[in-house]
Each structure stands twice: as C-alpha cells, then as structure tokens.
Image: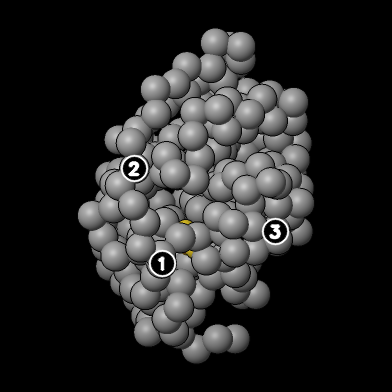
Amino acid sequence: MVKKPIYSITPFTLLDYPDHTACILWFAGCNMRCGYCYNPEIVRGKGKVGFDEVLSFLEKRKNLLDGVVFSGGECTMHQDLPYYASEVKHLGMKVKIDTNGSRPHVLEDLLYEGLVDYVALDFKALPEDFESITQSDLFEQFRESLEVLIGHDVPFEIRTTVHSELINAEKLSKMASFLHDQGYKGKYYLQHFVGEKETIKTLPHSKKPNLAFTDYPELELVWRN
Ligand code: SF4
C-alpha cells in the first residue's frame, strides 16, 4: 500500500459532486500530460497525505459531507482504490470518481463491487487528436471506459475541456457524433479553457466556440463556464 497516495484535500465543495456536499481527494500522479491541465503540481508531484489521515478527517466531517470526490491526477492508477472507496462507503458517504478513462478494468471492478455512486469521464479528443492533446496513446482505453459506463446503471457524465487551438467547433461536432454512435444519451459538459492558472504547457488565448448539436437531440450540451 502506498503510504501517502493523496496530494491534498479540498475540505468542502458544493460544485464538484452534483447535488451533494463533498470533499475532494486529489490523488497524486497521472498517466496523461494534457497541455491545458490546471494541476501540474498534482500530476507530477508525490502524495503528502496518507489514507489514515483522510479517514480521521472524514470521521470528523461525516455529518457535513454527503460524498467524497476521488480526483487527481488519475485516481484509478492507485491499486488500493477499491479499499479506499469501500472505507468511504462504510462511513455512509457516497463516492464520485473523476477519471480520464485510462483504466476501464479498474472502473468496471469498482462498479461491479458497488463502490461508486457517480462517475465523471473526461472525453479528451478523438483518436486523431488524442495523442497530441494528452501525450498518451490511451484513446482505446477511454472508449472501453465509456462502453463500461453505458452498460451500467450508475449515473455518469461526459466532459470535455475546450481550447479553441486544440478542439474547434468542427472537432466538437465530430466528438458529439462519436458519443451518439457509441449510444450515449444525456448531458455533455464542456468546460472552456480559461488559462488563469499555471498549466502543463503554455497555451495561447482560447476563444470560446459557438455551438449547437442540432443533429443529436439525445445529447444535451451544457457549458460549465
Ligand atoms: S487534465 Fe490530463 S494531465 Fe491533468 S489530471 Fe486530467 S488527465 Fe491528467
């Protein structure tokens, strides 16, 4: 067991778990290097907080918090994730997983064991742009994660970070078409890159694209900012 898997804790949020109060555990490390990533210190850094510390924190807060968000970095890279999730569930709290989709089998096991209540899956790009955006070749794993989630009844959302130099309106429309072809129905959240914080790469200014997916009525496009 990794002694200190977590980089830091955000003690309270109303924004990161839909309709729930929650805290966020920022798991250290990631298997992607997205240029627009707002958390370079978490992606490249080492954990500073042990899970025993997290549990004592949660014990004191359990009346205030409905759930715990496992974010990062990429939390599914941590092999003790099922144990962490089951400990949180034992405290009577819900578990939300934020993931880049690179570990479909980890996700599937967590869902099968009933250890997850909500998932936010990042859709970074289609295959032709995936490597340049994420510095990884993990598109197929992402696609499998999407398939796993579509085949389960645990609620989930799909979200894309949009930087106009990386993903323009035409590419977004193709991404919507891909989701449609995979059988996804529901909200498709877009988050426009703002660039107020340090990111993994220095990126130029981004212009928020104007969009509407009129061809896909089953997809509800929602801008988060
Ligand atoms: S934005 Fe990319 S690099 Fe940053 S944590 Fe998410 S997957 Fe990892």
- 71 vs 82, left or right, is left
Pointer 2: what residue?
206
Between residue 78 and residue 202, name the one nearer to us: 202
Q: Which SS class for mark 3?
A: loop
The picture places residue 94, in percent across and down from the top left corner, at 47, 50
Distance from label 2 to label 1 (Cα)?
16 Å
- Image quadrant in which you'd find residue 224: top left
Horizontal side of residue 156 vs 163, given as left or right: right
From this view, report whether residue 90 is shown above or below residue 49.
above
Q: Contact, CB < 8 Å: mark 3 with mark 1?
A: no
Local crowd size for mark 2, using a 10 Å CA cut-off: few (<14), some (14–19), many (≥20)? some
Q: Which residue is depicted at the point 55% across and 86% down?
A: 2
- Check mark 1 vs ligand 1: CB closer than 8 Å? yes or no: yes
Residue at the (50%, 89%) spot, across then down: 3
Report whether 146 appears left or right of 192: right
Mark 2 and mark 1 lie on one chain; the one further toward the N terminus is 1
Asked if disc 2 is less than 8 Å from ligand 1, the answer is: no
Tell me the distance, in whole angstroms, between the alpha carbons under discs 3 and 1.
18 Å
Q: Amino acid at mark 2?
A: Ser
Q: Which residue is mark 3?
A: 138
Residue 200, label in figure: 1
